[in-house]
Amino acid sequence: MTGFPEPTALTGRTATLPPMASVPAPQAEAAAPAPPHPLSAAELLRSAVERVRTARPELADRFDLSSAQDLSALRAGVHGASTADTTDSVDSEVLAVVVVGHLDLARWVRETCAFALALPPEARDAWRRSFTRTVYLAGSPANLRERFDFDHVAGDGSVAWRGPAPGAATATLRRLLKTFEAGHELTARPAATVTVPGTVRSRPAVSRDLYVATAKVTLAQALVHINHLLAEAVLDGLIGPGDRLTLRFVPRLNGLVAEFATLRVDTDVHRPDQLQAYAGLTTEV
C-alpha cells in the first residue's frame, strides 16, 4: 500500500526579531488519505471477462459473458469438456499438479512464482489456454522423487510441482495421492514479504502488495485463488525475478485503499449469483 511522506517542518528566522527569537514555521499539511476504493460489480465482471479474453479470446467472442452466471456456465463447460464444440477429454486438458507435504504460505508464494517463471514459452501458452488449471495433492515430495520427475521442488522439499502437461502425463500421480484438503477458514495473519527468485531480469525489480481475502475462505480455496493470480501475473510480466511481494491478509478486498494491477475474481461465497475478489496484486508500491 502506498505510504504518504511525513509532514516536513519548515523553520526559519525573521530579520526584524532579536537573534534568539524565532517564529514557528507553519507545518506542511499532511496529505489527505485516499478514499476507500469499492470494487463495483461491473469492475469485477470486467476483470473476470478480461481473464477469459486473455486466455481464450475465441470463447470471449463466442459466448455472452454479461453476468456471473454466464461465467460459471462457461467455466463448467471448459473444465467439464462437454460443450458441443469440443472433443477434449480430462486426460488431454493441460494442468499442473502440486504435491503439498508441508505448507508455509509465504514460501509457497515464492516457489509458485519460481515454478511459473521457469516454464518454457510453449508450456506457458498451453497452461494459460487451460486457465492455469492446477490440482493439489497431499503427499511427501521426498518420498516420491525416485518414482516421479518433478519440474520444480521447493528448496526445503515441502512442495513439488509437475507440469503443466496433458492430464494423462500426471494421471498415475493423481491416482496415487489424495486431494490436499484444508477445510479450515483462512485466518488473518501478519504481513510477510518474499522476494521472487531469479537473476535474469527484463526490467528493474518492483515491490507490490498481494492482498488475500480470508472471510469464509478455506485454506484450500485460498491456494487456488492465489495460484491463479500469481501464475497469470508471471505470464503477463507483472511479476518477475527480484520483485518483492508483501502478503496482506484482509477479510475482504472491497473498500481497500489500494490500486490493483490485477484481481482474482470468482463466484461470491456469500452470494452465488455475484462475483467476489479473492486476491489482488497492486500496482507498484
Image: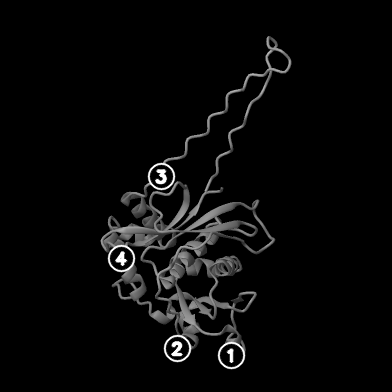
Q: Label 3: how many residues lie within 10 Å, few (<14), some (14-19) or many (20+)?
A: few
Task: Give the side of residue 208 with respect to residue 224, left or right.
Answer: right
- Above or below: residue 199 compared with residue 141: above
- Above or below: residue 2 compared with residue 78: above
- Amino acid type, label 1: Arg
Q: Position of residue 74 (x, y in %)?
A: 31, 66
Q: Are marks 2 and 4 in contact (CB under 8 Å)?
A: no
What residue is disc 1 on?
147
Of residues 27 and 274, the one nearer the viewer is 27
Q: Label 4: how many residues lie within 10 Å, few (<14), some (14-19) or many (20+)?
A: some
Q: Circle 2 sits in a helix, a strand or a loop, which is it? A: helix
Q: Circle 3 sits in a helix, a strand or a loop, which is it? A: loop
What residue is disc 4 on?
72
What residue is disc 2 on?
175
Quadrant of residue 274 within the rendered picture: bottom left
Q: Are marks 4 and 3 in contact (CB under 8 Å)?
A: no
Distance between the Cα atoms at labels 2 and 1? Answer: 14 Å
Q: Position of residue 29 (x, y in %)?
A: 53, 29
What residue is disc 3 on?
36
Q: Position of residue 31 (x, y in %)?
A: 51, 34
